[in-house]
Image (cartoon, rainbow, N blue to C red):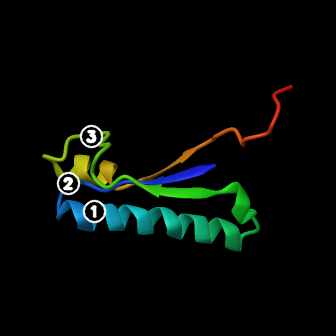
Amino acid sequence: MRVEGHTDSRGKDEYNRALSDDRAKAVVAYLTSKGVAAERLVSQGFGEDQPIASNETKDGRAQNRRVEFVIVEREGCQRR
């Protein structure tokens, strides 16, 4: 599973990229502390590059500060 971190558009790009990466890594750390195998997880930060709402409103910015989970197929696995 890929854990993707996102931010709103406030702040500098470099800061937002680091924040989104830290956000995703924190979720991975939590999941591994609860027993999910680390090799089943990968984290990635996207900064402000993939908004799902307008950054012009408080509610929109809140929606953009998020973590998403993406199920990915592992290499070498066969579908049944």
Q: Amino acid at mark 1?
A: Asn
Q: Residue furthest top?
A: 80
Where's residue 15, x and y in %?
25, 68
Where's residue 69, x and y in %?
55, 47
For the residue pair 49 and 31, the one nearer the viewer reads as 49
Residue at numbered disc 3? 53
Q: Amino acid at mark 3?
A: Ala
Residue at disc 1, secondary structure: helix
Is residue 74 placed above or below 45 in the rendered structure?
Answer: above
Q: Residue furthest bottom?
A: 33
Is residue 50 placed above or below 6 in the rendered structure?
Answer: above
Tell me which label, 1 or 3, sits earlier in the chain.
Answer: 1
Tell me which label, 1 or 2, sits earlier in the chain.
Answer: 2
Q: Residue at 86% across / 25% down in the picture? A: 80
Q: Give me the C-alpha separation between circle 3 and circle 2.
A: 11 Å
Q: Residue at 80% across / 37% down in the picture? A: 77
Q: Residue at 24% across / 65% down in the picture? A: 14
Residue at numbered disc 1? 16
Which of label 1 and label 2 is nearer to you? 1
Q: Kindly indicate the quadrant of the structure image that contains residue 30.
A: bottom right
Query: How many neighbours does mark 3 have within 10 angstroms: few (below 14), some (14-19), or many (20 or more)?
Result: some
Which mark, residue 9?
2
* Mark 3 and mark 2 residues within 8 Å of each other at the beta carbon: no
Query: How many neighbours does mark 2 have within 10 angstroms: few (below 14), some (14-19), or many (20 or more)?
Result: some
Is residue 79 placed above or below 32 in the rendered structure?
Answer: above
